[in-house]
Image: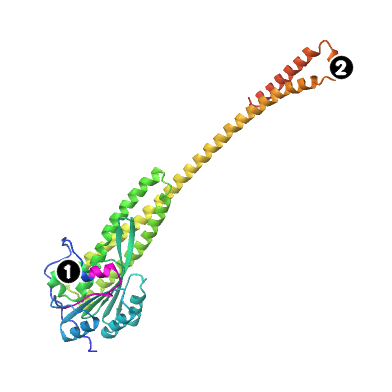
Amino acid sequence: MSERRPRASLSPLKHSWRRQTEPEHSSDAEEQAQEGPQRSVVQASLYRDGRRVSSPTTLAETFRQLREQPEGMAWIGLQHPTEEELHSLAAEFDLHELAVEDAMEAHQRPKLERYGDTLFVVLRAARYLDAQEEVDFAELHVFVGPDFVITVRHGAAPDLSAVRRRMEENPELLALGPEAVLYAILDAVVDGYAPVVAGVQNDIDEIETEVFGGDPAVSRRIYELSREMVEFQRATRPLVGMLHGLMAGFAKYGTDEELQRYLRDVADHVTHTSERVDGFRQALSEILTVNSTLVSQQQNAEMRALAEAGFEQNEEIKKISAWAAILFAPTLVGTVYGMNFDSMPELHWGLGYPFAIGLMGAVCVSLYAIFKRRDWL
């Protein structure tokens, strides 16, 4: 293996590419990579003075051609690479074993680390899925050396084929070397956050409508979106510090002035996105509180309605019970005097009938007065 070559001094940049709005289409290799893990090497290209000079089909061929290009730069794109491929790259480009281990295992937090003259960057890309109304996160690892850029994707986003196409359409930018490619990748990841922010904002608007509409399933939707915002925060918040770390090394590593301006622009976009995500989390927390309050109020109203219904039912039971007692009294008296025993003294009494009727009336009036005084009637 030949010794790695230092980059030549960076040439000035004359125009920007990031504001282009033309639709981009994935290359065949990228499309195949997105359809499945059949090929881990998505695309490998060699560039000289900002223009592509070859597109090797294997890593070994890429290594050989790069050694033959004294001022060349290799841009290798991988998706779900094998352990053997990563070890091959580590041996060729002298990648640090800790960085290789992180790229192999994935599930890393966003970070920026420097190993000698190689930068290792971990990014969390995001995309909004309209059909599922959820945020899908992917992981991107980038190795940046003096004459190479290696990207390792774990997930569908971002679409690096569009980044490659834009860079190739701007050879003066690509001629700035690996730093320019790193900027373009950072810019693509950050620009990919904008549709996610718009989609989440729309979700929050819908959730607010559902909360005040009394939708019982809204609590679950709030919880799921809150968890996605936690992941979004973990993707964006460390990126702010990472970009400031890159900007802090501008003078030390002689970064082109025009490229510095672009990186500051990316940092501004990241800061804005991070603030929006923080606002989303706060808004969802407040919406959840409001929803809990509304649910409690609804439950209290239902309990009050049940209590009122129970009270009314008790009142009706009291009335029925009172009238049943009033009607039972004359029935009891009549039953006693209807037993027809010969030894009963009242059977042959001339005033027995009026007495029995009067007794029935007196008992009924007394019971009515008692129940009326107690508001049973």
**Residue type, numbered disc 1:** Arg
Magenta stretch bounds: 30-47
Q: In which quadrant will I find the C terminus?
A: top right
**Residue type, numbered disc 2:** Pro
Category of crowding for the residue at label 2, using alpha-carbon neighbours closer than 10 angstroms: few (below 14), some (14–19), many (at least 20)? few
Q: x and y percent of residue 137 in the render?
A: 33, 64
Disc sitting over residue 165 in the figure: 1
Category of crowding for the residue at label 1, using alpha-carbon neighbours closer than 10 angstroms: few (below 14), some (14–19), many (at least 20)? some
- Whether residue 284 is visible: yes
Identify the residue at image location x=19%, y=75%. Answer: 255
Q: In the drawing, does residue 303 fall left or right of residue 243?
A: right
- Label 1 or label 2, whichever comes before in sequence order: 1
Q: Is residue 39 magenta?
A: yes
Identify the residue at image location x=34%, y=57%. Answer: 134
Identify the residue at image location x=47%, y=42%. Answer: 298
The reply to whether callout 1 and callout 2 are in contact (CB within 8 Å) is no
Secondary structure, mark 1, is helix
Residue at the farthest left position: 14
